[in-house]
Amino acid sequence: MNDITFPIVLVAGIGILCGVVLAIASIIMAVPKDEKEVKIRGVLPGANCGACGFSGCDGYAAALAKGEAQPGLCAPGGTAVASATAKILGGDAGTVEEKVAVVHCLGSNDNTQNKVVYEGIESCAAANIVAGGVANCEYGCMGIGDCVKACQYDAIEVCNGVARVDPTRCKGCTMCAKACPKHLIDMVPKKKQAVNLCQNCDKGPMVMKVCKVGCIGCMKCVKTCPQGAIKVDKFHAIVDPSKCIGCGACIEVCPRHCLKLMDV
């Protein structure tokens, strides 16, 4: 019994000594916490999406506490978080423009076809490496669902081969946009407006070969819009949300039915 008592006491003593040393070191080397930063971090949603332009919620909280950022940059938090952070900082929350994600593709199984049968890794990023994607339209949604996996709010689902966003659930965090290898997802102001749900930039005849509803850059929407909110660039109609009043005139004249009215 005496043979093992000494080793046990020795190991226990070393453990206690190390614990005391670590405790003293933690006190001496402790980094002072910014109480303001801690309070701000407490009201941020914790999505760590980077929509604010910082590394995550911790980075944004630190920047706010140092006066290096303004309230209202947190898209998932919206007005509530902007107001809460402004209250902690003792300033004005300002105006927060809510945004939602839009998938610029109508390439469902009814409107287009795949050029290959993909049997690889269940990932849009992986499928995109195979001949530029599996869809006939090189700009189109592949419907595998990287955006669905990236969304923390269950705001996206793949319906009939194409991703669709539920604007009532979308928080505008941009995670889906970052996950899309085709860059089909864009963030637009949460208001009534026309959006072109096609991203194809090829000439009309080429578009019509691969999709029944692809934009052909016919200019009819441009000529019809009373606000001058639409332009055609690279055979593709682009709506300026800051000018669009949601009148729907462009939608009525679009021969391809790729312009839709978003009303949230």
Image (cartoon, helix red, strand yellow):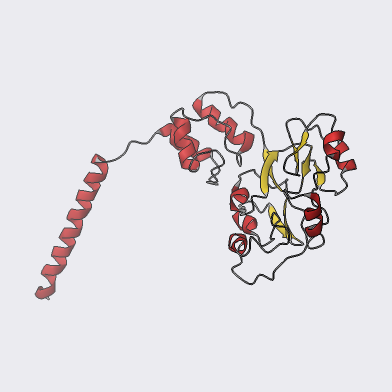
Total label count?
0
Question: Where in the figure is residue 2, as x and y percent of width and height?
Answer: 9, 74
Looking at the picture, tell me which residue is in the foreground, 85 or 27.
85
Looking at the picture, tell me which residue is in the foreground, 30 or 173.
173
Left/right placement of residue 205 relative to residue 57 reads right
220 w.r.t. 207: above or below: above
Left/right placement of residue 155 relative to residue 219 reads left
Give me the residue at 85% from left, 48% from top: 257
Quadrant containing the C terminus is top right
Question: Where in the figure is residue 123, as x and y percent of width and height?
Answer: 60, 63
Question: Where in the figure is residue 130, as x and y percent of width and height?
Answer: 61, 65
Left/right placement of residue 103 relative to residue 217 reads left
65 w.r.t. 203: above or below: above
Quadrant containing the N terminus is bottom left
Question: Where in the figure is residue 200, as x and y percent of width and height?
Answer: 73, 50
Give me the residue at 24% from left, 47% from top: 23
Residue 225 occupies quadrant: top right
Looking at the picture, tell me which residue is in the foreground, 197 or 246.
197
Residue furthest to the top in view is: 91
Give me the residue at 62% from left, 48% from top: 177
